[in-house]
Amino acid sequence: MAEPTREARAAPEERPEPVGNPWVAAVVAWLVPGAGHWYLGRRGRALAFLGLVAASLALGLALHGNLYRPLPGQPLTYLATLGCMGMGLPYFLLRYLAGYSGEVIAPGYEYGTAFILTAGLMNLLLVLDAWDIALGKKD
Amino acid sequence: MLSHFALMVIYALIVSLFFALLWRRERGARVKLFLQMFIGMVGGGLALAWLMYPFPPGPPAPIP
């Protein structure tokens, strides 16, 4: 029988310790930018991430960028909508409560759209980061 | 209204800060990654602008 490799023998000792429930971390991280890191005790980073996502979103709104929604016959809008929905609660509040949709004739429309989409995509990355931290794979 | 350049710099600033905080844990490594990304984005944007400079701008895009 083959000798187990050094990695295989070391694996049980190196298994990371979970620092929180990854599902809770991921859901709160998605709902409110930075909340996943806050839940996991990374308070400073949580505030920084909240500030960056909020700044990107606020600038996008100030420039009257597009808050994507699915348009029939335009498959890329489905993808862009998913990206925007990555920002969590703010997307639904803006879309359904405030009725925001952007202003296509505004001079900053394209730039604003990029900022809004970036806010959603950044928060999706924060969800993945919170998941990894909760599992102990990252600090 | 902010200029195109100012918006590009702000965008690069936000994205560079975000990834520096997300991907690096030590202060020095964060600063290094931030500078690499920020200079890369702003410098790359300017370089691309200069490369496109000889091309004619063409007619304005129609408003849908």
Image (tube, coloured by chain):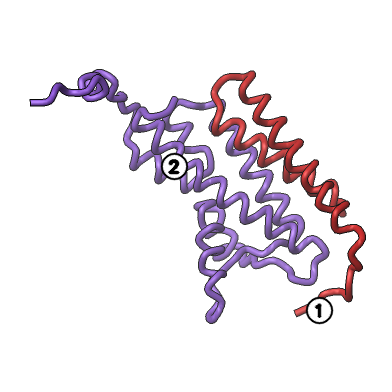
Chain colours: A purple, B red
Chain letter of the residue beneath label 2 in the structure image: A
**Side of A2 relative to A132 (left or right):** left
Residue A90 lies, in percent from the top left, at: 56, 53
Residue B62 badge: 1
Q: Nearer the viewer, residue A113 or B26?
A: B26
- Rendered view: B38 above or below B46: above
**Side of A6 relative to A2 (left or right):** right
Quadrant in which the N terminus of chain A is drawn: top left
Residue for point 43% across, 43% down: A28
SS for dot 2: helix
Residue for point 55% across, 65% down: A96
- Rendered view: A133 above or below A99: above
Circle 2 is placed at which residue position? A128
SS for dot 1: loop
Residue for point 38% across, 29% down: A137
Quadrant in which the C terminus of chain A is drawn: top left
Chain letter of the residue beneath label 1 in the structure image: B
